[in-house]
Image (cartoon, rainbow, N blue to C red):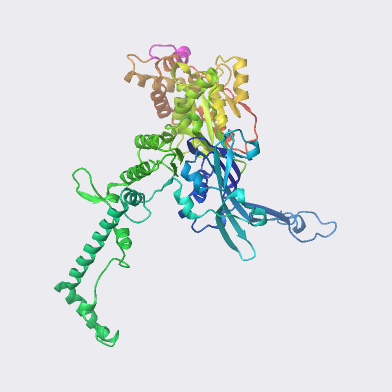
Amino acid sequence: MSKLMIDSFRGFRSFELRCPGHVVLSGVPRAGRSDVISALARVLLPESRTSPTMSDLWQTTITAAATGDTEPGKDEESSDGQPPAAAQRLSSVEPRPYANVEVTLTDLDPELEQLFEGFLERCGPDGCAVAEDQALPGAPWCVRLAYRLVYDSDVEALEQFVYYPLASNPTAGKYTRVPASTRRVLPVVMLSAGRPLQLRAGSPLRRVIDELDPAAAAAAFDVLRSRVTHAAEELAGHDAVAQAVGVALASGGVGACLTDTPLDTAQVGFRADDGSAEALLKSLQPTVNLDAAGPLALASHGSTAAAMLGVAEAIMLATAPGAVILADDFGDQVDTANAEHLAARLRASAGQLWLSTRRPEVARAFDPEELVRLTRHGGERTWHRLKRPADRGRIRAMRQLHTQLLPALTSPAVAITEGPHDLVVYGTVDRQRLPGAAPLSAAGVRLVAAGTGQDGGIGEIPVVADLARSLGFRVIALIDRDKAEEQTIKQIEASCDVVVRLPSRTAIEGAVLAGVDIAKVRAASATLTAFLSQDPADGVPDVKVVEVVKRSLHKKSLHEPFLDALVEETKTPPPMIVDVLNHVAAAASPSYSGPAVIDIPPIPLPSAASPS
């Protein structure tokens, strides 16, 4: 699939994606990950077109003025504070009359080219169909398939079909439909969350059984049906069963009332459902012998085992050249290591892989430019994609993707700190505020650092911010201003939606101690002897305690234990840090209209304790 276009399908008013390679879809909730996979399945898989609903159509809000008049000279506000009837607006939701999904298929093998004879088009360098007189010499062939869902308001009914856009005119209601048998030939596999290792018709395992040796498979199922039928007959004739059936027939004289000749036990038998082999196969469920538990039903081994075997089936079916695999919410039912491992195996096996996922581990199995992040802005769905790095600066920036931004894939906003120390402080205090205040995650914010270790620092914030904004994140920067240059601050402001700045010449350690009594600082510092040979504040005059503790925290990276001890002493998180977090939560809202640069007001540093 080289191109996907969606028009008025579910929550997408319009969507167009050029996709020459693998695609992993992620992003914020309700941004359309599953809808993209469903749209592809509607076009390519005949079995996916069951029971369309009105919610499959884009919903349009219609606003109209309500009828009613106001008396001359009357105030244009009613006694209940609402606009008068003539000024009120009524809203209703109406669906678009149609939804359309179009897919362009390229790299067709000779058999598929023959199958689509009469509907082939020349393919341009960008993977899109072009007119033959505009194509390059020797340009390859491609074919476009489209799905159409139409709502007939006269009969209030939905109609759906798959057609060839080249030979159709939707405006005139003329469609050349694609037969279901044609689409079944396409090497497309939908990895579903259903039960694996099923023998029923249409299941992945059954498809492989039938492909390997159809005659042997039919013979094996015939033997099963014959033996089960024979066993059921023996069961019906067993004395214990026949006696019970006889009692049932004799009860109330029912056996004599059903037919002219009284019914006896020899006329009652048993079989699986309608007696067909398929009915029997539907009832058979796999058992697996793991560890020392014996052969238990697969479901008894937990969701992870079933999910992994389901992926194994998809890999098994992806052996066809150019096979396309579709999967929705991939990795939800397996652990993190296997989520990444199985995604990587699928990517290596498939000609093209389309996965939607909420798991950053799955995204790690893909190249950065294969990631498509879906977002919602102002009620509209949008998508974002990274470009392959073209210079050293972009290569350096891309290193931050896996370490910093992938864990935030489903968060609408990121708050970028200068480095690991700042991240630890803000993250620890964010947890300490519970249960009195909601954490940043409640506002859709993920805290990240501008690099780790030596590659961090305020100068790295624009690098991470630019990368985050290219993926559609709302970006907030948290900076110390202890020794930042004005040029760097200007770069940060240009790269971020909002910047929250500590008071001038205030580092994160100073923000932790601002407004705290010296006695409390000393008590918290004394607990650091569990990690240090000596209390940093021991024997230090009160006027120097703050500087000594700040220096020790920064040099020894003991922010977490010190914060825990400090909150235990003060019974409240550091006020300046809390103020920063409150501003971040407010700035994360899409409706935020405050300043782009928020300066946190200073709080007096701890005062010296009064002499005893």
**Residue 47, horizontal then vertical, whole percent:** 45, 54
**Residue 270, horizontal then vertical, whole percent:** 25, 70
Residue 29 vs residue 269, the one in the foreground:
269
**Residue 504, horizontal then vertical, whole percent:** 58, 18
Residue at far left of view: 239
Residue at far right of view: 72
Above or below, comparing residue 293 to residue 346 in the picture: below
Q: Is residue 389 magenta?
A: no
Above or below, comparing residue 15 to residue 516 in the picture: below
Residue 224 vs residue 340, the one in the foreground:
224
Q: Is residue 540 magenta?
A: yes
Above or below, comparing residue 179 to residue 272 in the picture: above
Residue 141 vs residue 42, the one in the foreground:
141
Q: Main secondary structure of the magenta part?
A: helix
Specify the segment rendered in magenta. 536-550
Going by the image, does 251 lie left or right of 159? left
Going by the image, does 283 lie left or right of 545? left
Residue 473 falls in image quadrant: top right
Q: Decide if residue 318 is in sight here.
A: yes
Q: Decide if residue 381 is in sight here.
A: no
Query: Residue at 28% of width from left, 65% of height from top?
Result: 272
User: How many numbered discs?
Assistant: 0
Residue 110 vs residue 547, the one in the foreground:
110
Residue 252 falls in image quadrant: bottom left
Residue 199 falls in image quadrant: bottom left
